[in-house]
Image: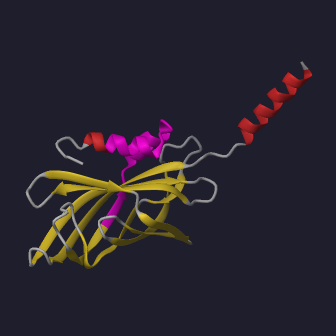
Amino acid sequence: MKMLKVWVVVLVLLAVSTPSFGYILVYNALSRIKAIDSVANSLVGIAVRGYLILDINDTDGDVDASYWLIYGKDGDGTKVYTWAEPDQLQLSVSGKCQSVSMDTEDGWSITVVGKITNKAIGLAAGKQLIAYSMSGNLIIPMDGGVVLNDNQSLTGSGTISITLNSTKTKAANLSSEEIDDVLQAIQTSLVGYSG
């Protein structure tokens, strides 16, 4: 009986002292790209929408996992979306500013920056210091990229803006969703798009 009481006390202490695993941030993304398509030998201008989903570790502020999803029309006019885990995503904080840089499977190199503010994101602990909006540039290196169309071979650049989707972020954190659940919900919401 003594042993049972000891285990109950240990479990209570662990429950109280266990750190939070983190929180989810869902950002809307909008990018405008101008590039040369060396397959079609033409200049293309494309506007693309998407999402950046981040799973942030509460203890050290590192990104534990992330997804990059873009959607729009391919070269044939078909509604499509693509998603992937960005390569080498780095989130950096300096004072009251934050930057995110990443490479995507589509061949993009993206860097965005923004100011950190105190925002309610659905956490029981209250507000969190995050960048509500960030903006920056993207580069598609020599003959290396595509935008929703595997028949392309793009070289170019563009601008990108990323803004917190407060509704999706709060919903994910209030229900303690995993990042995979958030990605699946966004994919489900893209009615009429094929992935």
Q: Give the x, y percent position of residue 49.
A: 24, 58
Q: Is 119 inside the magenta-drawn segment?
A: no
User: What is the x, y in percent for residue 105?
Assistant: 33, 64
Residue 166 lies, with reference to residue 12, above or below; the image says below
Quarter of the rendering containing residue 136: bottom left
Q: Nearer the viewer, residue 180 or 51?
A: 180
Left or right of 9: which side holds 101? left
Instruction: Report the front residue among 2 and 105.
Output: 105
- Say whether residue 129 is left or right of residue 142: right
- Residue 3, percent from left and from top: 89, 25
* Residue that lies at the very extreme toward the right in this rendered image: 2
Asked whether residue 96 is in view, the answer is no
Image quadrant occupied by the N terminus? top right
Q: Residue at x 31, y 59 (%)?
A: 29
Q: Considering depth in this image, is 169 or 141 the residue closer to the camera?
A: 141
Q: Can residue 163 be found in the magenta stretch?
A: yes
Judged by its main secondary structure, the magenta piece is: helix
Nearest the viewer among 134 and 34 is 34
Query: In screen coordinates, is 155 left or right of 180?
Result: left
- Residue sitting at 22 percent across and 61 percent down? 48
Colouring scheme applied when the structure was drawn: secondary structure
Q: Is residue 25 visible?
A: yes
Q: Position of residue 18 (x, y in %)?
A: 70, 43
- Residue displayed at 24% across by 44% down: 190
User: Which residues, given as a range, are shown in magenta?
Assistant: 161-186
Instruction: List the single residue furthest toward the top.
Output: 1
- Say which residue appears at 31% left-offset and 70% top-offset: 107
Residue 108 vertical position relative to residue 8 in the rendered view, above or below: below
Answer with left or right where residue 21 lies relative to residue 162. Answer: right
